Image: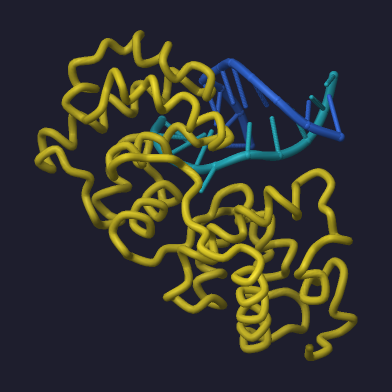
Chain colours: A yellow, B blue, C cyan
Amino acid sequence: MVQGEETIKEAQGRARRVFALLQKEYPEIRCTLDYGSPFQLMVMTILAAQCTDARVNIVAGPLFEQYPDPAAFCRAKLKDVEVAIHSTGFFRQKAKNIIATSKILIEKHKGEVPTTLEELTELPGVGRKTANVLLGECFNTPGVIVDTHCGRLARRLGFTQAEEPRQVERDLMGVWPKKHWTGFSHMLVFHGRAVCASRSPKCELCSLRRHCPRTGLPQGTPK
DNA sequence: ATCCCGAGGG
DNA sequence: CCCTCTGGAT
C-alpha cells in the first residue's frame, strides 16, 4: 500500500518522474563495488553488510590477491580470512559464511555463482539483498535491492510505509517498472549517500524536492 | 526481536 | 558520545 490518499497509479506516475530526474542526475550508475568476477562481487556484497563499500573496496584488493576464487577460500584457514576482512565488521560471521559458501559453490555449482534467486539465497550469508545485487549486476535479471539506503528513501518518498525489507521490496515492485528495478535501486542508494542522508538530508539541494512528501506536493498537485 | 562487529562522521 | 554504514541468521 502507498501512503495516505495517493493511489497506486499516482504513485507509479510519481515513481516515473522521480526515476527520470535521478537518471538525469546520475547517468550510467551501477554498482560501486570494484569487482573482477561474479564470485568476487558475491564476496564483496557479503562483506558490505553494515559497512561502506568504500571500505569493502579497500579490503578487497589484498583479500583477492590471497583468495581469488572459491577454491582458494576452501583451502583457507578461518582465522586468516577473519584477519583479512576484519575492518568490515561482523568478521567472524562473514569469514565463516564466505568459506562455507565457497565450499557449496565447488561441491554443488561447479565452482560458479548460481543464477537464480532461490539458489543464491540458499548460500550462507546471501540474503535477498545480496542475491538481487548479483542478479542485476551479473545475470541481467531485474531485482529490487533493498538495503538501508533504498529502504529509507522509499519511505521518505512515500513509496512504502514498511520497515521490513521484504515488504519494502514488494511495495517498490508495485510502483516501479520491472525493467528498471536494478537501476532504480542503485540510484536511490547513490542519492541516499550524496543527498538524502540518514542524519541530515540536504533537502534544499535535492532534485526530487517537489516530488517528495516531506518537502513538496501540498496535496497531490500534478507537476 | 536480537545478535553479530569495526570504523568514520557529526 | 551516538548514529550510521548497500544485512543475514537465529
Answer with the quarter of the image where residue A94 lies: top left
Residue A122 in picture, x, y percent from top left:
28, 44
Q: Position of residue A89 (x, y in %)?
A: 54, 22
- Front residue of this view, candidates B9 and A177: B9
Q: Nearer the viewer, residue A140 or A25?
A: A25
Q: Quadrant of the C terminus of chain A?
A: bottom right
| Residue A178: percent from left, percent from top | 44, 75
Is the residue A84 above or below the residue A219 in the image?
above
x 32%, y 35%: residue: A124
Residue at 58% x, 35% y: name it.
A52
Specify the quadrant of the image occupied by residue A208. bottom right
Residue A108 as seen in the image, left or right of residue A161? left
Residue A63 appears in which quarter of the rendering?
top left
A194 vs A165, left or right, is right
Judge whether A120 appears above or below A183 on screen.
above
Residue beneath the point at 25% across and 27% down: A68
| Numbered label tally | 0
Image quadrant in which the N terminus of chain A is located: bottom right
Image spot of residue A121 (x, y percent): 32, 47
Q: Residue at x 49, y 79 (%)?
A: A177
Observer-nearest of A92 and A76: A76
